Amino acid sequence: MPEFDGADRQLVLEPDRCIGCLSCAAACFMGHRDTPNLHYEELERWTGMPAVCRHCEEAPCLESCPADAMYEGESGAVMRSRVLCTGCRSCSLACPFGVLNAETVRRQVAKCDICVDRLEEEPDALPRCVAVCPSGALKFLDPEEEVPEAGYVLVSGRVVCESHRV
Amino acid sequence: MPSPPETAVSRCPLCSICCPVGAEVDGLGHGTMQFPADSGFEGGACARGLAASHLLRSDARIYEASVDGRPMVPEDALEAVADMLGNYEASEVAVMLDAYRPLETLSRAAELVSAALPKALLCTGLPPGDPALLDAGLAAEVAPVNLEECDLVLALGDPFSTHPPVSRHLRNMQLAERGNRLLVVSSAVGRTGLGADRCMTVHPGRLAALTCALAVECGANEVSSALGGADADAICDESGVPPSMVEELAGALDEADTGAVVLANPAGYCCRPHAVVRGAAEAARESGARLHPLYASPNASAAAEIGRMPPVLKAMRDGRVRAAVVLGFDPMGRMAPAVWGEAAEELEFVVHAAPVRTRFAREADALLPLALPWEESGTLGAVDGGQVRSSAWASLPEGVVSMDGLLEGLAYHLGADASASGRAESPEPRPVPVERVVGEDVLEGHEPADGCATMVAEPQVYADGNTAWLEVSSWTRRMAGSEAAVMGPGLAEELGLQDGEPVSLGDDRVVLDCEVREGMPDGVVAVPSHRESVRSLLHWHATEDVISVGPAEVEIRSAE
């Protein structure tokens, strides 16, 4: 199996390109039928963005989990053990971005794994939400090396780039 | 892992883009989408394709045939249906095929119908937007990827909703260089309008006049002579279209080095769709802009050659058709319930082969479980003018029959030679002369009466193609988000409505939440068209040639 090397790449969003079609949320639902974890949230009346785990370097959810269900994977992504998770919602409360939502029925907390099942199979593959984005608003790249050419760029929930059209 | 060969790629048949996509169904009834990493636009489908996969194992899926309410295996049902059809002359039977099926399936179906019921009326259920593009002689032969090379794109309609993958190319075009612009002309502010550099909205009754005035301003003599030699100013004066809008659009097209016009299947959602399409096409030709007609159905041209719906509906209205066999689509979901209802009044026997249980399926005399489009392999006509092979996303569930298999069985029981072929070659469809679609009526201005608004259908990415899905899939409805009546601030203020408050349409026949959106034309309300009660409020034209949605005047008031 090829080695998964997703540590350098992050989910990047250009809000200006988002057309609000919800394909990202639909793809997440289809791929993680048990615990879909990407939600499309309205920021303002006509602006929205996919709200998904930022995979923080110093992840508060990881520190807060009493069951050690949250852990940092080899790739650097913050992962959740489905076996250990008890659905106590500690991570939901700790998450500074409010993107970890508890699943009350299954008593588990949905957690973005950047579609590690796909990336392990094919290192150049993309997370499902990125793969289906029809406008190119969602990207999966190394923000230190590849920054989209224009617009606001959100990485880990922060604006890291505001460039103007040239 | 090596890339799969082209022939093994599954395609989404739900619009003419034919995106590579796939789905896997496990033994527990769960579907999982697959997105080939090496296929096109980072490999995947829009929300429409994703929603489609959810229907593979929908609760509303039909797995059992029935005749007169009695369940039976498909073979027995086909025999019973053949017996019933034997009571009618072949000329009294209409057969209607789903246009979203592979070319081979459509062709084979036409052959089998010709063999089994040689004098039956045969047609395909095209989406309402496509006939206007076909009648203008517009071939889907220019790949939308070239849009990225343009410095100006004029989009008519809402391509981000009807063909979401196009949004990538248009966004790239906008951001490639300062000055590259996306202009949108529509009767409502949709997804494309919200992302445009300039969005111009006009009353839906004036959209045809606007495009014709634009064509004349760009130098289209044919349109001008069809309107009695009128110049652009005269058209604007008569119709109430702002002349400045026409001048701005014509100037922008003229100044563009590499301009393009995208006809984003507007015809299903506007008044006088043939005139709108013809005006826009002529304007593009005269200004040297590249034209991109975006069809809703991948095989529109081939489906139209087999036969169109309006003449069959007319035969039904005239009482010449007594039995109908509807294969693969819900006619009440693809057109107004009233249009179908009026035509179907005289029908004595209705056979419906359907993948999912809709209201129409429940009312049919005989019901046959049919494959979904993505459970059949075949060839699809793509938007770039070429043809692509598509393999089935999923295998046929037990008890479900492919359209080929169903028609072969029916032909056998009707005593026809199922191997018969030799369907007469249909002539290439010719463009309808411009004077037949551009006439004085495009100059008619329109103002809604007091207490009324003009209603247009807002294209929704989930609803286009087959509105039945939203009705039968709660997941799709949830993903599609809230349904709303979209209006401008002026109309909202006039009605005393705030954003989110309920609004009543059509004397309380429909109540939706109000959504105030800047830029909407005065007196216009845009509504989602997938709900039957809303669709019944829209005004549909059904003549011998055309079925199309037009603006409808509807009573509107606050529901509080």
Image (cartoon, grey):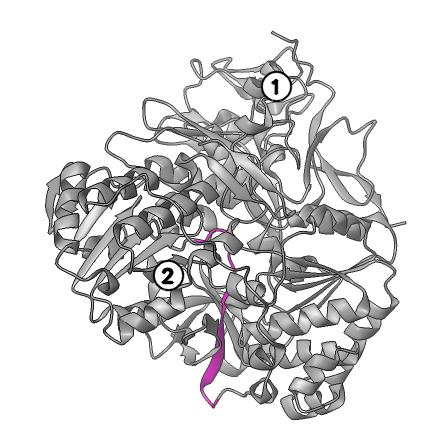
Q: What residue occupies the far top of the structure in this picture?
A: A1
**Residue B463 magenta-drawn?**
yes
Q: Is residue B246 left or right of residue B84?
A: right
- Quick check: B202 above or below A65? below
Residue type at the position of mark 1: Leu
Instruction: State which quadrant residue B323 falls in.
Output: bottom left
- Is residue A165 one of those drawn in magenta? no
Q: Pointer 1: residues within 10 angstroms few (<14), some, or many (20+)? A: some
In the displayed structure, does residue B314 sit left or right of residue B33?
left
Q: Which residues are magenta?
A: B449-465
Q: Nearer the viewer, residue B315 or A80?
A: B315
Give percent across and percent down for residue B517: 59, 67
Which residue is at a point 85% across and 70% down the rendered structure image? B254
Q: Which residue is mark 1?
A: A119
Q: Real-space Cα distance between discs 1 and 2?
A: 40 Å
For disc 2, the marked residue is: B531
